[in-house]
Image (tube, grey):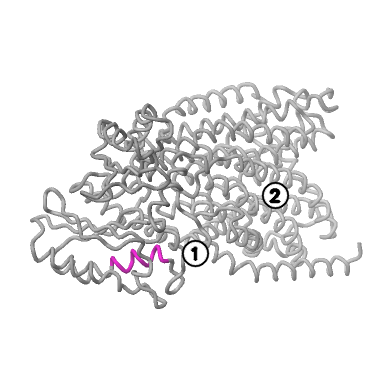
Amino acid sequence: MKAWMWRAGIAAVLIVWLLLGALGGPTVGRLSEVQQNDNANFLPHQAESTLVSDEAAKFVDSKALPYFVLIQREAGITADDLAAVKAFQDELRTLDLGAGKVLGDYLATPVTPAIPSADRKALLLTVQTDGDRADEVVGEGETALYAVADSMRSALKEDLTPTGLQVYVTGPGGVLADFVVAFGGIDGILLGVALAVVFVILLIVYRSPILPIAVLLTAVLGLALAALVVYPLAKNGVLQLNGQSQGILFILVVGAATDYSLLLVSRYKEELHDYESKYQAMKVAWRASIEPIAASAATVILGLLCLLLSNLGSTKGLGPVGALGIAGALIAAMTFLPAILLAFGRRIFWPSIPRVDHVHSSDQVGGRRLWGRVSGLVGRRARRVWVVTALALLACAAFLPTFQASGTSQEDLFLDKVESVTGQEQLARHFDAGAGTPVQILVPAGRADEVVRTATKVDGVASATAAVAPGVPPKVVDGKVLVQATLKVAADSPEATDVVEHLRTELDQVGTDVLVGGNTAINLDVLNSAQRDLRVIIPTILAVIFVVLMLLLRSFAAAVLLVVANVLSFGATVGVSALMFNHVFDFPGADPGIPLYAFVFLVALGIDYSIFLMTRVREESQHQGTRPGILVGLAVTGGVITSAGVVLAATFSALAVLPILFLVQIAFMVAFGVLLDTTVVRSLLVPALAYDIGPKTWWPSKLSRQD
């Protein structure tokens, strides 16, 4: 191909990507507008709590989203306090939310008088808003969900705090509003921290001020491309996006795009030592890199798409969201990055500009450089290396059963103290912990009294009633009554899910048509769905990865070796995480979805590094034989794969800047697991085991018959 044709192609690619960046950049910032963060929306339609929620909606004019306003005075509520609270209640309807909207526009039911606590030290005011309108935008881009909480908090601090009263806005509405604030850092802080961390690492790796900028620009453009697809799909309900999956999308794209870029740049720089023409060097490097990079991306994409088998909408939504992110990273790394590298030529590596000297990194096998020494160690002590490594990983994996993933209370989801959490703690001091968030029991009208009697006998249930109000008969809709039971424990706690599970068992004896729902039941159904997902999705992902590896490496034995090695790595990571979470960080537990998310990222992403290694080993084995090929492949890829692992670990670590327990735990597990994969599994276990097995590693391909 003539030089002018190369230049024309480069210009065309760069122009297309600049246009995509201009369109997709603003869209990245708008992804938070199409988030859904309500657990109830994530459950399957056949879940018992979903069935109750659908039927319970018929008992009210709209789906209610309650905010609890807790007012307390340690010395006791006075007559003046009651008058002040009554005045505040009267003004609630006129509270300004912005854009000409007032709180009264969003009330589902009239605000009833505040309920005093038994100790007369607190008042509980319940504000029921229309949950179906919670996502409406009011003011300057704020949703009604957040604006209601913010306006009430401001009014309370202005009207009641000066009198010495302590005031809190909590309950489901208050908690969700605080989530809005916590996830507000995704668009700016998270992405900024991730890019800054990657930039520093790339400066160290490349020792060049220009090249890191090109790689980061590749990642940003990959994210812009993904956002252009994710935003309209989420907006139109084709896929579900929540705050967690949006944060993970950012990290996945930045990490994957950087990893793919590192591999391509490394091979390109290697070829520049052999070819005078930068175009020829890129042609050879691109052809050599596309197979492992595309296979790596395909493995992650297919692994993520396996999440579509989930019963949980949040997990199911992460599948296509993450897959689209990886696709964007792959396309950017294999089109924009080559174009920008060719546009700058050898100067992009300044000040360490590669020259044509035919010096190859494979010459370092057994030499004094780090990966030469590691390669030499594997060659001399292969069996000892893999046996010791495997035993160490098994020792770590032995702690896997101690990993606690049965869920946490809403108070524990935040690592910072937020008002809704403090308010919930104070509410539990004065009222039954489950007050305001009752268990909903849907029952045929003729058996309502029996259900009430049975429910009140269940340990952990404080009270149950079918009456709308004292002296008012229960409301009957389609021959059914809604019984409400108040729990003695916090409605969002793991203890509450145990109570509801027991309650369901007892009420099944009354009739199988008696259904138990409400927020606590939703949490229980989420936990059960997460456990089902583990049993279904993990084997599916392993099968998919195994098939991809077998097709890529043309070997059954190599595919088995890599899958077993990475499963062992995952087990060791979870075991170490259990030790750290339980005894060092003192976390209260983990979300039930954590093990599945960790498995997807660690196995699907961790297998990348073994793919990068073994594709190069296979290439070298065709010319030098299996055992020499393993040593050369390890020496050649050692630096770039380790750099890629460090980058991915660092990008996932950026999730820890958001004060959400789930994201901090995912950050630790993936960062630790990726480093374990790159420094131990890919560097020692896989090459040493393959070296010990020898040519049979490639069985049943022709390479397995090499001497």
Q: Quick one: which residue is furthest to the bottom in this view? A: 100
Could you classify mark 1 by the number of other residues whose Cα lies within 10 Å: few (under 14), some (14-19), or many (20 or more)? few
Could you classify mark 2 by the number of other residues whose Cα lies within 10 Å: few (under 14), some (14-19), or many (20 or more)? many
Q: Position of residue 515 (x, y in %)?
A: 41, 37
Taking the magenta stretch, the answer to whether it contains residue 152 is yes
Residue pointed to by mark 1: 188
Magenta: main secondary structure equals helix
Residue at position x 35%, y 40% in the image: 445
Secondary structure of the residue carrying numbered label 1? helix
Q: CA distance from mark 1 to mark 2?
A: 28 Å
- Position above or below: 626 against 131: above
Q: Position of residue 231 (x, y in %)?
A: 60, 61
- Bounds of the magenta segment: 144-153
Residue at position x 46%, y 31% in the image: 575
Q: Is residue 113 left or right of residue 108?
A: left
Residue pointed to by mark 2: 263
Considering depth in this image, is 381 or 574 the residue closer to the camera? 574
Q: Position of residue 365 (x, y in %)?
A: 71, 36
- Do residues under tags 1 and 2 come within 8 Å of each other at their CB atoms? no
Q: Is residue 222 left or right of residue 177?
A: right
Considering depth in this image, is 116 or 357 the residue closer to the camera? 116
